[in-house]
């Protein structure tokens, strides 16, 4: 049975801290729904009603485009190793980029520098939902993949900026992402 909460509780924080993977969903008013898996210890709880993640450069920038258009964001985590649970955070999100004043306040809360980092996605929590997860299978965590870090480090800052200028300025549906590239 699904339960809704207005904010993150201490039990929610404990569950979040144990997760190795999470999923981010967003959608434009008209166009394709985007669902992306995330990892690499990039998710942070900023308060009981505010969360965020450090977003690395990828082949697209769908979430930023959707947030710029309408702000809707869902983050989902599942228990793959212990008691079954599906955990969703529904919120209003926005991108915070290195040129933004808020970047300097928030970025230190997300750990060590990540080669290829492009922005923070910050969400104000509207509601939290927990549900059973009885159908979620067990999976064992082995390790993080180093591929994205290695790729970004090899390209270097200038190469990553050129890549973002070419691949991250518009969504697959043609929406602007708002990403500022030097």
Image (cartoon, rainbow, N blue to C red):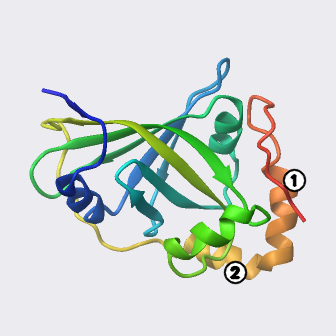
Mark 2 lies on a secondary structure that is helix
Q: Position of residue 38 (x, y in %)?
A: 47, 56
* Residue neighbourhood size for the residue with mark 2, other residues' Cα within 10 Å, grouped as few (<14), some (14–19), many (≥20): some
Seen as rendered, the residue at the extreme top is 30
Seen as rendered, the residue at the extreme left is 83
Looking at the image, which residue is at 12% across and 26% down?
A: 1
Q: Which mark is residue 153?
A: 2
Report the front residue among 78 and 11.
11
Q: Position of residue 29 (x, y in %)?
A: 65, 19
Earlier sequence position, callout 1 versus callout 2: 2
- For residue 76, which quarter of the picture? top left
| Left or right: 56 in relation to 52 | right
Quadrant where the C terminus sits is: bottom right
The residue to which callout 1 is attached is: 166
Q: Position of residue 135 (x, y in %)?
A: 16, 35
Looking at the image, which residue is at 39% across and 47% down?
A: 49
Residue 26 versus residue 177 in the image, above or below = above
| Left or right: 21 in relation to 139 | right
Q: Which mark is residue 19?
A: none
Distance, label 1 to label 2, CA atoms, is: 18 Å
| Left or right: 75 in relation to 20 | right
| Cβ atoms under marks 1 and 2 closer than 8 Å | no
Q: Position of residue 50 (x, y in %)?
A: 44, 51
Looking at the image, which residue is at 58% across and 53% down?
A: 121
* Residue neighbourhood size for the residue with mark 1, other residues' Cα within 10 Å, grouped as few (<14), some (14–19), many (≥20): few
Looking at the image, which residue is at 78% across and 32% down?
A: 175
């Amino acid at each position: 049975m699904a339960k809704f909460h207005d904010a993150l509780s201490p039990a929610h924080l404990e569950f979040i801290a144990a997760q190795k993977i999470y999923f981010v969903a967003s959608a434009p008013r008209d166009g394709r729904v985007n669902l992306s898996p995330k990892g690499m210890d990039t998710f942070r709880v900023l308060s009981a009603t505010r969360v965020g993640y450090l977003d690395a450069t990828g082949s697209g920038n769908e979430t930023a485009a959707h947030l710029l258009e309408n702000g809707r964001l869902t983050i989902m985590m599942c228990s793959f190793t212990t008691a079954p649970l599906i955990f969703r955070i529904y919120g209003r999100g926005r991108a915070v980029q290195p040129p933004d004043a808020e970047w300097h306040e928030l970025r230190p809360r997300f750990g060590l520098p990540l080669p290829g980092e492009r922005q923070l996605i910050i969400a104000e929590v509207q509601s939290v939902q927990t549900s059973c997860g009885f159908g979620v299978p067990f999976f064992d965590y082995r390790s993080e993949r180093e591929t994205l870090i290695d790729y970004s480090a090899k390209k270097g800052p200038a190469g990553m900026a050129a890549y973002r200028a070419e691949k991250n300025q518009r969504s697959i549906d043609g929406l602007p992402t708002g990403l500022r590239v030097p």
